[in-house]
């Protein structure tokens, strides 16, 4: 098994070269398998903003910490004290509309290119009380434990530590404004997923 991370930014993912590369992936025998990892767009934005703020506060702060790196985790904890401010109103709605459309477009591009893929959720992989999403990947790849896997089994194999455990309402400085913007819209579930 070989793998790499390709973040599907539309300015590169939706290019002629990327489409041709995906078609090539879809035509090889045996077929290449792609794991398409999605994330709640609010959390993705918060994470990106936190990384940027962390680097402003501590220039050499790594994006992630090894599980046993106590000093790195302390530095992240100190940097986490600074909240992030998300856009609200039309700016937030527009951004979420673009983000969700792009997520759907990635799936459509993969299907049209004939790529064998499975779509999984970051939240289900890292925040769920079960290992179902991990077993979904193993079943798709036809390797590893495909049943009776526990979340404790999975977490015991992690080499990177979680560097943030606060809820959105504690991390986003203008959470009430964000909540007011999204209440009653198709994006409201992103507040609580």
Image (tube, rainbow, N blue to C red):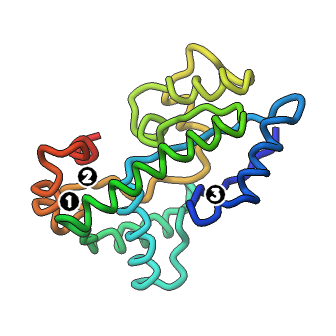
Q: What residue sits 46% from the left and 40% below the top?
A: 126
Q: Which mark is residue 5?
A: none
Is residue 29 left or right of 187 when viewed as pictured? right
Q: Quadrant of residue 192?
A: top left
Q: Which residue is mark 3?
A: 13
Task: Measuring from the top left, give residue 178's x and y in whole percent.
Answer: 17, 60
Asked if marks 3 and 2 touch (Cβ < 8 Å), the reply is no
Q: Is residue 122 above or below residue 116?
A: below
Q: Which residue is mark 2?
A: 167
Q: Which residue is mark 1?
A: 170
SS type, badge 1? helix
Is residue 81 left or right of 108 when viewed as pictured? left
Asked if marks 2 and 1 touch (Cβ < 8 Å), the reply is yes
SS type, badge 2? loop
Task: Measuring from the top left, give residue 7's x and y in whole percent.
Answer: 60, 57
Count residues near mark 2 (Cα–Cα under 10 Å), then give few for <14, some for 14-19, many for 20+. few
Closer mark to the observer between disc 3 and disc 2: 3
Q: What residue sits 43% from the left and 66% below the top?
A: 48
Q: Is residue 162 above or below residue 31?
A: below
Task: Measuring from the top left, give residue 139's x and y in whole percent.
Answer: 66, 20
Between the residue at mark 3 and the residue at mark 2, the CA separation in whole angstroms equals 31 Å
């Amino acid at each position: 098994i070989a793998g790499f991370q390709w973040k599907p930014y539309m300015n590169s993912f939706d290019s002629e070269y990327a489409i041709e590369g995906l078609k090539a992936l879809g035509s090889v025998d045996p077929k290449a398998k792609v794991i398409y990892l999605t994330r709640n767009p609010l959390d993705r934005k918060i994470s990106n903003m936190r990384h940027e703020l962390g680097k402003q506060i501590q220039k050499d702060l790594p994006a992630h910490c090894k599980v046993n790196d106590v000093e790195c985790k302390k530095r992240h904890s100190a940097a986490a004290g600074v909240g992030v401010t998300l856009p609200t109103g039309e700016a937030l709605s527009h951004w979420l509309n673009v983000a969700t459309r792009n997520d759907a477009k990635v799936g459509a591009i993969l299907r049209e290119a004939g790529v064998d893929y499975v779509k999984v959720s970051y939240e289900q992989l890292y925040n769920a009380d079960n290992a179902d999403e991990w077993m979904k990947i193993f079943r798709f790849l036809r390797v590893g434990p495909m049943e009776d896997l526990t979340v404790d089994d999975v977490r015991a194999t992690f080499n990177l530590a979680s560097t943030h455990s606060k809820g959105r309402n504690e991390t986003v400085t203008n959470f009430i404004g964000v909540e007011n913007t999204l209440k009653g819209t198709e994006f409201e579930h992103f507040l609580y997923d």
